[in-house]
Image (cartoon, helix red, strand yellow):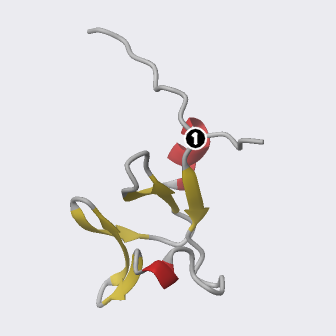
Amino acid sequence: MAKFRKKPVVIEAEQFDIMSKPLPFATQGICILGPQGWFVQTMEGSLHISNGDWIIKGVKGEFYPCKPDIFEATYEPVE
């Protein structure tokens, strides 16, 4: 199987924290509270998010959730 490396792109992300005011991305209608908890609106539909998950804005302006351990292994801060 061929191997590939992620291209170095800069993304915007906020860590979802229920205690934070205002909630990350909530004012933009990206994070919504539903009957089964919090969800993030993605291009594929609504995906459940947990406290501590990262909400990433992709290179095409799309949003998607990422678990903290995966985020830490994949991304690093940009100066």
Picture residue at 54% right of the left edge, 47% below the top? 11
Viewer-proximal residue among 67 and 4: 4
Three-letter code, disc 1: Val
**Is disc 1 surrounded by few (<14), some (14 to 19) or many (20+) residues within 10 Å?**
few
Q: Point out residue 53 in the picture as x, y percentages from the top left corner.
A: 52, 63
Farthest residue, direction bottom? 35
Which quadrant of the structure image shows residue 30?
bottom left
Which quadrant of the structure image shows residue 38?
bottom left
Residue 2 placement, left or right of 79: left
Quadrant including the C terminus: top right
Viewer-proximal residue among 30 and 1: 30
Farthest residue, direction front? 60
Residue 28 placement, left or right of 77: left
Q: Point out residue 75 in the picture as x, y percentages from the top left corner.
A: 60, 40
| Residue 69 vertical position relative to residue 8 in the rendered view, above or below | below
Picture residue at 56% right of the left edge, 57% below the top? 13
Farthest residue, direction left? 44
Which quadrant of the structure image shows residue 1?
top left
Q: Point out residue 52 in the picture as x, y percentages from the top left corner.
A: 57, 66
Q: Point out residue 33 in the picture as x, y percentages from the top left corner.
A: 38, 87
| Residue 24 vertical position relative to residue 11 in the rendered view, above or below | below
Q: Which residue is mark 1?
A: 10
